[in-house]
Image: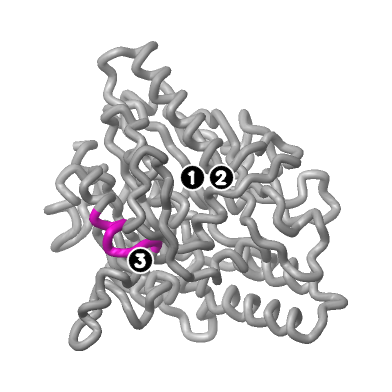
């Protein structure tokens, strides 16, 4: 039933009255493959791999506790938002940073899944330049296909910047934009599968958390718009993802056959942004502007979790993983925090180290960004 799990029927019959166990298991599996990005991301300033992946491709999944994941990583992916953060050291401002990886299922996993799976996994917001890009919430034309720019298809400018900006000085092989790296590698893998294993079914699965969900959806649209998926189904599994574009963007994704399943904690504020006031649900006197509002793409799978005194946990990916494993349509216990306070705590510590010497308005901007991060709004 892999085509149904990948959304060929928009998950009809798999979400109600309860999530089908096969779908739930697959969602849990993909969420852990995304969580691997956080576990492998180096936040130690003393490390030579600072703000990059701690491990080489061959052993990364094993090092983060997933030796039997069933995927071979073929490329690391880097992104560089076209944003400079005041007072930030050059090594952390406007530079390409490790954002995730491209992988392909092993022969054994392929037999289990029923098809060869090309996977792209994205982490969420961590660096100051990334959250600054996230705050750029204006809509602008995507214009990713030069032959058919479609000026009516608009996406959030910060996400687009992160996706299309390049840092040619990246030390770890991230030359070119995130977009260029992804299109090159994923189309290579699809072509290789068609050449080396003719007749074998292939799927393209894009999974991400928070900002990573936005990048996954942008790439899904881009890949399908250019036809580089060669007919392979393109599916996005979004965990705690925001809105990405306008109604025309959603319509075009639907027309191209891009499938998106948005796993969203009903108490997670990021899943309601941007467009918290003007969105696909806008009615009444504001209805004429609905087409220009931010609009979610795909089907939503609502989860339910909140813990008083730990509001950031409603957006934390480890919470999503625990919910999917335990039954996300019911209240679930919060996962234990890591000894160092978890990813958000480490991110906030990182932001705090950069603030020395900031002038008043810059310091205020950084504090606002820190507040946004702490509350899990990005």
Q: Which residue is mark 1?
A: 121
Instruction: Check residue 249 for magenta coloring.
Output: yes
Vertical position of residue 182 compared to residue 258: above or below: above
State the residue at coordinates (13%, 53%): 12
Q: In the structure shown, which secondary structural element does the residue marked by tag 1 occupy?
A: strand
Residue 317 spot, x, y in % from top left: 49, 61
Vertical position of residue 287 compared to residue 178: above or below: below
The quarter of the rendered structure image containing the N terminus is: top left
Magenta stretch: give its range.
244-251
Q: Main secondary structure of the magenta part?
A: helix
Q: Is residue 18 left or right of residue 71?
A: left
Of pointers 1 and 3, the one earlier in the residue sequence = 1
Q: In the structure shown, which secondary structural element does the residue marked by tag 3 occupy?
A: strand
Q: In the structure shown, which secondary structural element does the residue marked by tag 2 occupy?
A: strand
In the foreground, 238 or 355: 355
Residue 221 spot, x, y in % from top left: 35, 46
Mark 2 to mark 1: distance in Å? 5 Å
**Circle 2 Cα neighbour tier, 10 Å, few/some/many (<14 / 14–19 / ≥20):** many
Q: Which residue is mark 3?
A: 264
Q: Are marks 2 and 3 in contact (CB under 8 Å)?
A: no
Q: Which residue is mark 2?
A: 100
State the residue at coordinates (36%, 55%): 151
**Count of numbered marks:** 3
**Circle 1 Cα neighbour tier, 10 Å, few/some/many (<14 / 14–19 / ≥20):** many
| Color encoding of the figure | one colour
Residue 321 spot, x, y in % from top left: 43, 58
State the residue at coordinates (67%, 49%): 97
């Amino acid at each position: 039933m892999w085509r149904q799990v990948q959304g060929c029927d928009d998950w009809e019959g798999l979400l109600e009255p309860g999530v089908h166990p096969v779908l739930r298991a697959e969602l849990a599996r993909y969420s852990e493959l995304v969580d691997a990005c956080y576990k492998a991301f180096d936040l130690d300033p003393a490390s030579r791999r600072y703000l990059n992946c701690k491990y080489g491709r061959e052993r990364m999944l094993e090092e983060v506790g997933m030796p039997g994941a069933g995927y071979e990583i073929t490329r690391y992916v880097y992104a560089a938002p076209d944003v400079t953060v005041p007072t930030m050291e050059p090594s952390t401002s406007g530079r390409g940073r490790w954002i995730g990886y491209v992988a392909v299922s092993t022969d054994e996993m392929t037999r289990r899944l029923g098809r060869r799976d090309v996977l792209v996994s994205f982490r969420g917001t961590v660096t100051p330049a990334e959250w600054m890009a996230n705050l750029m919430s204006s809509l602008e034309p995507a214009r990713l296909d030069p032959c058919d720019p479609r000026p009516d298809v608009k996406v959030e400018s910060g996400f687009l910047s992160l996706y299309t900006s390049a840092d040619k000085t990246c030390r770890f092989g991230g030359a070119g934009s995130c977009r260029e790296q992804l299109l090159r590698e994923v189309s290579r893998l699809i072509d290789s599968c068609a050449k080396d294993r003719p007749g074998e079914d292939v799927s393209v699965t894009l999974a991400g958390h928070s900002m990573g969900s936005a990048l996954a959806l942008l790439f899904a649209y881009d890949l399908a718009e250019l036809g580089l998926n060669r007919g392979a189904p393109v599916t996005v599994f979004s965990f705690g993802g925001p809105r990405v574009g306008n109604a025309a963007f959603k319509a075009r994704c639907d027309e191209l056959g891009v499938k998106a399943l948005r796993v969203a904690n009903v108490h997670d504020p990021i899943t309601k942004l941007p467009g918290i006031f003007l969105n696909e649900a806008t009615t009444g006197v504001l209805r004429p502007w609905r087409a220009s509002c931010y609009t979610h793409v795909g089907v939503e799978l609502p989860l339910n979790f909140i813990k008083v005194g730990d509001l950031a946990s409603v957006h934390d990916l480890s919470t999503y993983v625990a919910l999917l494993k335990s039954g996300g349509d019911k209240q679930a216990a919060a996962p234990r925090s890591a000894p160092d306070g978890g990813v958000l705590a480490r991110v906030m510590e990182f932001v705090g180290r950069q603030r020395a010497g900031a002038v008043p308005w810059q310091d205020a901007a950084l504090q606002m960004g820190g507040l946004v991060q702490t509350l899990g709004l990005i």
